[in-house]
Amino acid sequence: MSLFLPRRAGLVFAVLTGSWKRLGWKLVVLMSVWGSSCAHTQPWVEIPHFQNTHKNYRIGIAGVYDVNQFDFADVMLDEMERRRVFSCVELTPDLAEPDCDYVIRGNFGFYQVSTKNAFHYTSIYFLGLPLLLGLPNTNSDGGMDINFEIYHKGELLKTYEYRDIFRDQRSYLTVWPATSLDAELRRMVHLLLRDMWRDLFGYRGAA
Amino acid sequence: MIQRTFIALWLVCAAGCATNLQKADRLMRLGRFADARRFYQTELDQQRRLAELPRWTGREYQDQFNALNSSRAILGVGNSHKDEGRRDAALYHYSYFIQFSLRHRLDSDREIKAIEEWIRDSGIAAPATEVGLRTLFPSTKRVSTSAAVSPDFKADPPPVPPKTVVRPQKPEKKASTPAASQKLARSIDREDEKPKKTTDEYDNADSFVNW
């Protein structure tokens, strides 16, 4: 098409194309910011710097129960195995398991309330097309209270308690997963690992 | 004819579809424990997800999960581990099952008795946990809530409980003379002669019953 345009028009066309590109990128950035704001009161602790520490400890998990006594120990087990911070992690009902150096037991309460905002309901009258812009239409509020008990050969060593309150805004174009019980529990496990490393194993770098 | 065929097919599909628990129970009877465990776990995951969504009835929050189905799923997972010979995993899930049943006040006496018999027959050592299987094993090794201990600390062997045995109360004899009644009040323990304890002291003494 540019072959049939006069030279000036071609230059104008090039400039316009460049500005449209920049505008497009700005819109993409804005949409991703709009569509993915999420806030937590507890941080997400990165575990990589634990990899090189001395970690010949066997850990037992004696249950991670919610208020309805459902067990989520498999989530904690998966996260600890994935991070490879201990030589062995296993499920055990015995708080004084002789094969384990430490046994962890947890109890938590979790809630999450998701609501659609006014933009979502207004979009219905426009056949839902404004939702394609990526503006947030779902607000989630929630929190988790958890306490972990660390036992050493049947004796209670330490208790760790964490509380995280979060708020999440999502659109239909948000690509990464929403906040969920699974994700929150993994966040709490990271906090526990950080504090265990600092308090029980003396690794100051975890703070 | 075609309509009847469709109706028949629809009935077969409707009747043939079973719940996760029914499928799992059928697979357990066939001896396919891993497949059965998958269905039990699916049912448990569904119930777990439903438990996150309580429903407001106008007066109170009502849970949407089925506690009985959940407990059957947990027990099923434990049974599948037991039948495959995985004792530790079975023990873990039986402990989970007992805690869940107690929490939701389910009538699980028959299942708990069966678990008790299996533990007795297989000679599993009593765990020191305070919950779950603790109801089956009142262990002498108690979990203590002591202060924080350094990981370098070498724990001492658990203390041996004192050998104080509860003695059954002897029937009271009518004393003919005041001196005789004094003698009855001071019954002597022949094993340790020193402390001359009265029957009241025996009643009030802290004692450990060894199971």
Image: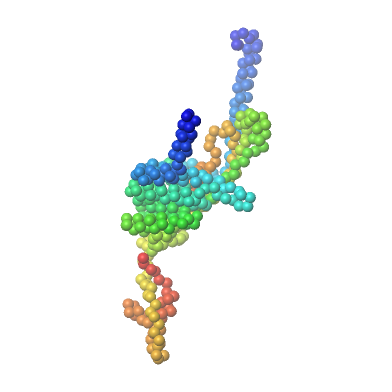
Q: Residue at x 61, y 18 (%)?
A: A17
Left of A149 or right of it: where is A41? Answer: right
Q: Nearer the viewer, residue B197 or B94?
A: B94
> Can you give x and y, in whole percent of width and height, for residue B187 in the image?
37, 82
> Can you give x and y, in whole percent of width and height, for residue B182 in the image?
40, 87
Left of A188 or right of it: where is B141? Answer: left
Q: Residue at x 44, y 56 (%)?
A: B108
Q: Residue at x 59, y 34 (%)?
A: A171
> Can you give x and y, in whole percent of width and height, for residue B106 in the image?
48, 55
Q: Which of the 4 quarters of the picture holds residue B186?
A: bottom left
Asked if residue A46 can be seen in this view, the reply is: yes
* Residue with the most extreme bottom position: B177
Q: Nearer the viewer, residue B138 or B191?
A: B138
Q: Nearer the viewer, residue A1 or B51?
A: B51
Q: Which of the 4 quarters of the picture holds residue B159?
A: bottom left
Asked if residue B154 can be seen in this view, the reply is: no
> Can you give x and y, in whole percent of width and height, for residue B87 in the image?
35, 51
